[in-house]
Structures are given as C-alpha cells and as structure tokens.
Image (cartoon, rainbow, N blue to C red):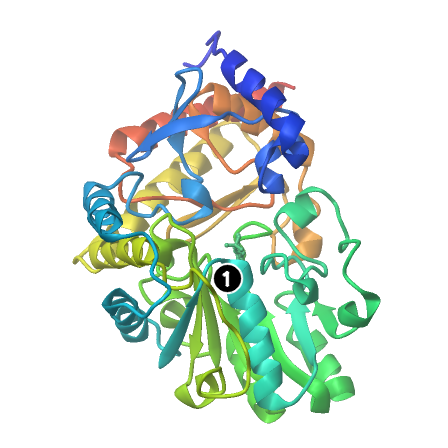
Amino acid sequence: GGEDKIMSFSKSKELFADAKEVIPGGVNSPVRAFSAVDAEPVFIEEAKGSKLYDADGNEYIDYVGSWGPMIVGHGHPQVVETVQQEAAKGTSFGTPTKLETEMAELVVDAVPSIEKVRMVNSGTEATMSALRLARGYTGKDKIIKLTGCYHGHGDSLLIDAGSGVTTLGIPGSPGVPESIAQETIAAPYNDLEAIEEIFVEYGDNIAAVILEPVTGNMGVIEPKEGYLEGLREITDEYESLLVFDEVMTGFRVAYGGVQERYGVTPDLTCLGKIIGGGLPVGAYGGKEEIMDHIAPDGPVYQAGTLSGNPLAMAAGIETLKLLQEPGVYEELEEKSAKLTAGFKDNLNDLDLPYCQSRVGAMFSLFFTDQKVVDYSTVQTCDTEAFSLYFRKMLEEGVYLGCSQFEAGFMSLAHTDKDIEKTIEANYNALKAVKEN
Ligand code: PMP
C-alpha cells in the first residue's frame, strides 16, 4: 500500500527556485513547470530503463519517456554506445554524412507515405516546414488544423492547439499576427462534416489539412471509423495536401505509425521524438514529386545548421534498429494492454466512472464519464481530480505527464513488476481521489 510514504522534494525545490531566477518560469518548455497540477517540478539527474531518479534520490517509474522519444527505455546501452562512438569522431560538421542517408533509408522503408525525407531539429520545425512546402507546392494559402491538436509552436499552428496551450488555457498566443492567424482555420477533430463545410467555402485556397491522426496532445483519441479515409478523399477532391503529424505516433503506435496501423496514406508526414532516440530531431517527408520542391532541388526554402546532426542520427538509427526486432510492437501492445486493464479493474472496484483510451503504446485516463471523441468532450474532464491523482501517483513513485491533456507512454524497458506496481499505485491514487 502507498499509505504514509514520506518523500522529500527539498533539493528539487531549491533547484527550481534557482532556475526561476534566470529561466522564464524556471523551465525551457512550459508544461514542465507542473503548474496545472499545483505542484513543483522534480529535477531529474539520471534515468535508466523505465526509471527516473531525481535530485532528492527519489525513484520513479516513468510513463513520460521524455514526452515520447524513449521507447526503448532510458540510456539503452546500444544507443549510448553509438552516441559515444560518434561523439569521439566529432559532434557536428555541417557537411553531408553517410549517417543521414542511413536514417533516411530507414524512414523511407518504414513510413508508407514517405519517398524522400528531410531532417530538421524539432517537431515544431517539421510541421512549419511541411506547411511551407504544402503552400509552396499547391500555391494556396490557407490551412485547416484541428482543435486540440498540437503541432509545436509555429505561428500558423498556435491556434486552438492542445498540450501546454490547453493546459495553460491560452487560446492562441500574443505575438502571432492576426494576418497569419487568419490563414488558419480550426475545425473539431473527428467531424468530417465540419471539414466539408470549410472546403465548400474556401476549397480553392486550402493548401493542407494537418492533424494528429491519433491525438496525443489532448489525450489519446482515436479517429472514428472512416474519418481518416474521409479526409483523404476530400483533400484529393480539392487538390489540397493531407499532412499527418506523426511526431508522437510515428514508430509508436506501429513501426510505420498511424498510416500503417489504419491504412490511410497522407501526402506529407511529420516525424520527431523516437527517430532522434532522445536527441533533438524532427523530420518531414512525403511523395518525391512534392519533396522535390524543397531547396536545393526546388524553390521552397528550408535549412538548418545542425540538421542531420551525427549524434542525433546515430541515436535515432540505433533506436529504429532496436524497434525492428521481431515481436517488439506485440510486446508494447501487451504491456500497455496489461496496464490499462489493471486501471480498468481499479475503476470498477472503486466504482468510478472515468474513461480510458489506448492506441498501441500510448494511453490516457480521462477524469470524465463521457466518451472522449474531440476537444469539447475532453473539456468535460475534472482537472482538479486529475491534479490530485497526479500528485498521489508521484508520491507513489510513478511519473506521469503533468496534465490531463497529455498521453502516457509505455516503453520496452517497463517490466511486469513496474506494471504491477503502477496498477497498485493507480488504485491508491484513485482511492484518494474518490475519498477527496
Ligand atoms: N507535433 C506533435 C504531434 C507533438 O506531439 C509535438 C511535441 N509534443 C510537436 C509536434 C512539437 O515537437 P517539438 O516539441 O519537438 O517541437
């Protein structure tokens, strides 16, 4: 049982106070501040396998995995070794390297829509670049994005976004010019009619529809049957591009991402997280005919000093190779199913009406009794209940995403014992929520 556990967070508290003196909010990315869960962040010093270790010596079973990348576990010996070997040869050359071709070949082989791929340094860059390409290729200006989907912090995409934007309740962001915001049209997720209406009105000027085909940044929501197919049809009809943001889902819900798992092929795909093996990476790719519009082959400009960085390529390549081993995705599926089945038993035993969702190795526990299908249903969640749940789980030694609107991530490093301990912690935390 998790009763009366006393955990100290005093070192983390000190470190956070120091950080706030010199870093806005003490963090280099807003959700890390724990502000949505009435807590202060823990400062991590080391991670190994499924575990995080903080400055106070506390150990956590980690279901954040650096927000997705760490699918083979933290500090995997093969990943660490290859990064060390490459680092000894030099950390950046600003020239082409063989590693970049190797990485591109792995991505092209894996992802159905991708014939050519360009590496960048973050998911944000990937989506920004994909949209520029979509606009440059089609000669059209407007884009459709879906409410609650997060695609990084590029100007055009900070409109009705999920993740930290939702967590902090920010509708858009000051600093995004109205003239740019006007070119983005937001529509609800899982609502094909809404998309059709927009196309009827603006159809000749829509460069692309961009979405998280399975969402993670408002929690895990699956596309309704026929939804992705419908988007494929309508974008084809209006000669606009379908862009899947698979920064989170790529190499996670299946080796080839959502497009492999659901059998719908977009024109362009954005990647990040897992393909960098924990180093800073993003990528965008698609049909050769479209990708050939990028400089230096074509006129659409996009570049990067550190793009295709050898350390990031090495970490990513090794991670993808580990994911090619037989049975890996079955194992992720089984472990994740075992975890959420345990949570379900706990919800039943405690007679709590909350809902769960899971696609492959990403999962959510929504503190609502409504079926979550889009942003408006996810808004029915009791975020105070989540907040208490989060803090209790932390005290039980389980590290979750610090917002109701984030996904949980399973890794290959999680053991049966980890999962059993997590299920027990979940019972204790849910009990505390119920008794509150
Ligand atoms: N797209 C999706 C689907 C994401 O989940 C994220 C990051 N959580 C991004 C884009 C942005 O990636 P980055 O934080 O690397 O800029």
Left or right: 203 in relation to 402: right
Quarter of the image with the C terminus is: top right
Q: Residue at x 30, y 49 (%)?
A: 332
Of residues 300 and 325, the one drawn nearer to the viewer in this rendering:
300
| Residue assigned mark 1 | 214
The picture places residue 20, in percent across and down from the top left corner, at: 65, 27
The picture places residue 157, in percent across and down from the top left corner, at: 66, 64
Q: Quadrant of residue 136?
A: bottom right
SS type, badge 1? loop
Left or right: 256 in relation to 362: left
Q: Residue at x 41, y 18 (%)?
A: 58
Task: Tell me the amino acid under the disc marked 1.
Answer: Val
Quarter of the image with the N terminus is: top left
User: Number of callouts in the render?
Assistant: 1
Q: Is residue 100 above or below residue 319?
A: below
- Is residue 223 shown to the viewer in this render? no
Of residues 268 and 406, the one drawn nearer to the viewer in this rendering:
268
Q: Residue at x 48, y 7 (%)?
A: 4
The picture places residue 324, in percent across and down from the top left corner, at: 21, 60
- Residue extending furthest left? 326
Q: Is residue 171 above or below residue 428?
A: below
- Residue extending furthest right? 178
Q: Is mark 1 within 8 Å of ligand 1?
A: no
Structural crowding at the residue carrying mark 1, measured as other residues with C-alpha within 10 Å and reported as few (<14), some (14–19) or many (≥20): many
- Is residue 382 shown to the viewer in this render? yes
The picture places residue 171, in percent across and down from the top left corner, at: 77, 53
Q: Residue at x 41, y 72 (%)?
A: 118
